[in-house]
Amino acid sequence: MPQVQSRLRKFLAPLAAGGACLLLLLAATGSSGALTSSSLPAGAIQPTERQQQLARQIASNLEQYHYSRRPIDKEFSAQVFDRYLNGLDNQHSYFLAADIAAMGKWRTGFDDMIHTGALEPAYAMFARLQERNRERIQYALGLLATEPNWKLNEHYAFDRDKAPWPRDVAELNELWRQRVKSDALSLMLTGKTWPETADILRKRYQRVLARVGQVSGDDVFESLMNSYAAVYDPHTNYLAPRSAEEFRIQMSLSYEGIGASLQLTDDYVTIGALLPGGPAAAANTLKPNDRILAVGQGADGALADVVGWRLDDVVQLIRGKGGTVVRLQVLPAGAAPGSDLKFVVLTRGKITLENQAVKQEARSVQVGDRTLRVGIITVPGFYEDNDARSKGDENYRTTSRDVRRAIGELQAKGPIDALLLDLRGDGGGFLPEAVALSGLFIDQGPVVQLRTTEGRVEHLDDPDPGVAYAGPLAVLVDRTSASASEIFAAAMQDYHRGLVLGQTTFGKGTVQEVISLDHRWSSEPSGGQLNITFCKFYRVTGESTQLHGVQPDIELPARINTKDVGEGALESPLPWDRIAPVAIRADASLAGVAQTIAKQQSEHVAHDADYQWLVGALAALEQNRADHSLSLNLAERQRERTAQEQLALARENARRAADGLPALKALSDEPAEDQPDVVMAEAARITAQLALAATNSPATTTTAATAASAARH
């Protein structure tokens, strides 16, 4: 599910994510005449001749091959201009209203710009951003000469994406005064003195100032091209050569580091996802959206404050030889600046496909007076070892082969009463593997439908009649389960083959392919690559998963906010629609089972201490997320933080008391192994209940004229 953010957003270049397989499942008008280089100030970054050629090539590919076949015209131009401008200053903290008015003359010229390769206006907009950025950082540095008044009762509204651009320099100065004070207060809350705080911020701002001049022409070009691509849909994107190389490194699954994808969120390098099997995931001390503030080498190396650094520079600090230690100072996800920091110590390791492959375990689950054996198979992605396959290796690895093997290994150690597939965090991958995995659990029939922009529909059927496992089945998903995960979960639901548990999935119903922009028979430098959406997929019911996702039969709590994460939270998603259903043979044995188990589950969790602890923690997290401003009164912020810590500690000790664990004096005293995976425990218990229900409901099969009755809306 590749999604490239602007490399110019705070001048950082995020790691690209996704897959490079054949099929990928992976968020005033002015003159439109000739725009010349006279718009660019002396010394500004200029578009190269190669980039001008690439722009025309990218425009042709987008118009010709994207699913929507949308032309890049005047209406399109205005949308690109807005995207590009938002990428430059998404918090409306650098440009003045007068800057926006002056740049408005190019709003309807972005169509001509990419078709002709005359990219100078976009580079001129970036040059103005560089100018404003230098002015703002110089102003921020000047503020550090005087300690702020911490007793004033004022608030800083840090979420400004919908705020108007400042009218004049005085309004912009006031905004930055509050921003600098908020930065300083965050450090003061950690026990630092004002001189220490001012020194840290001075160095931080000076690094940002230095970084203004470190942006390359590739950075500007990639951000500009992605402004065009993103108007088509969130999963079509351009990767410049450096990003394309990172893309290939990730696809090779062979590098040494901590096993976490990183992205830029404002000035923070943020944890995007933890790679299953990597050191970070194994330690379970980092979470998605945690923000990295500082990095240290070895057990006692000095911590380097990395707030405001280029992302690729931070990546280089965190990556390193396997077996060495890296230390991270982290601001937890969802916490306001100035909240308690945590320190994470990790030993680097080699991140390979092996570490990210399918895993299995067996768990004994008590339901009433019965103890059942539940097999749990974790599916982190839908992969295929293309290199091994192309070399003729008959034992090349795929997700479906590894799941078949895992089932066999579980059964070899004794009968399993039910099977649970954990697809949480599985963002998709290779489309044929979604079909092949579904085929392990249904006898035969169509799994998914593909529709091209011309309206041609193709059914992808189970490639291997027969089943690898015919017993009770459940599938655990969350909001980040996407694409191939959604195809599999939908098929299990539509065939009534198993229960889907968890959150509504991401809602990505599109397929991408990779177009290389390299010239194979010339000495031209690499042009990067274009990941482009060329078709949509549909359930056998005819329903699209686009935007709607797959809704669970039984909902379970999760830390992911569905309003902030998912296809609907991205800009320009393709619309939901439906096509004709196809006939399938659905298993009728699950009829009514979901409702019965859901009722039992509701009664059980009302008295489950671990479950109620999670619900309470999630409620507190949502309350924190809802606050878009911060008090700039030091004493008030200290009181807020103390109150939050006391509530969290009370929740934790209530859970520990119920579980027979000793109380904690502070949250930092809790061993990592004491933190339960509440959702997995509940999903395993529901799966065991499903096994008990199956013994009382003999399986029957009914022929469905259509699968429409199985649709979830």
Image (cartoon, rainbow, N blue to C red):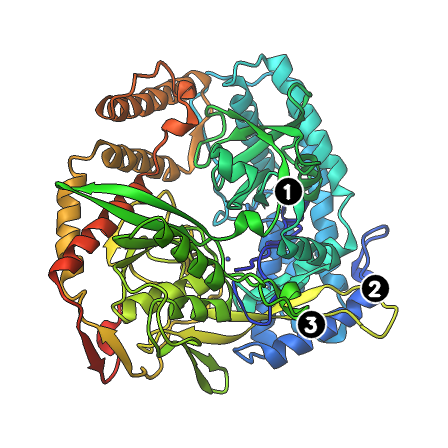
- Name which residue lies at 55% across and 21% down: 187
Q: Amino acid at mark 3?
A: Ile
- Position of 441 with respect to 23 (left or right) is left
Q: Amino acid at mark 2?
A: Pro
- Name which residue lies at 14% across and 66% down: 698
Q: Is residue 609 visible?
A: yes
Front disc: 2 or 3: 2
- Position of 248 with respect to 590 (left or right) is right
Which residue is under mark 2?
Answer: 525
* Vertical side of 444 occupied by 297: above or below: above
Which residue is under mark 1?
Answer: 350
Residue 217 percent across, percent down from the top left: 78, 55
- Distance Cα–Cα, label 2 vs label 3: 16 Å
Instruction: Please name whichever residue, 83 or 677, is drawn nearer the observer in this view of the structure.
Output: 677
Instruction: Please name whichever residue, 398 or 134, is drawn nearer the observer in this view of the structure.
Output: 398
Q: Quadrant of the C terminus?
A: bottom left
Label 2: state its secondary structure. Answer: loop
Q: Considering only order in the chain, which callout, 3 or 2, is on the residue closer to the N terminus? A: 3
Residue 641 falls in which quadrant of the image?
A: top left
Residue 18 percent across, percent down from the top left: 57, 58
Q: Amino acid at mark 1?
A: Lys
Figure label count = 3
Q: Considering only order in the chain, which callout, 1 or 3, is on the residue closer to the N terminus? A: 3
**Badge 2 vs badge 3, beta-carbon distance below 8 Å:** no
Instruction: Please name whichever residue, 389 or 606, is drawn nearer the observer in this view of the structure.
Output: 389
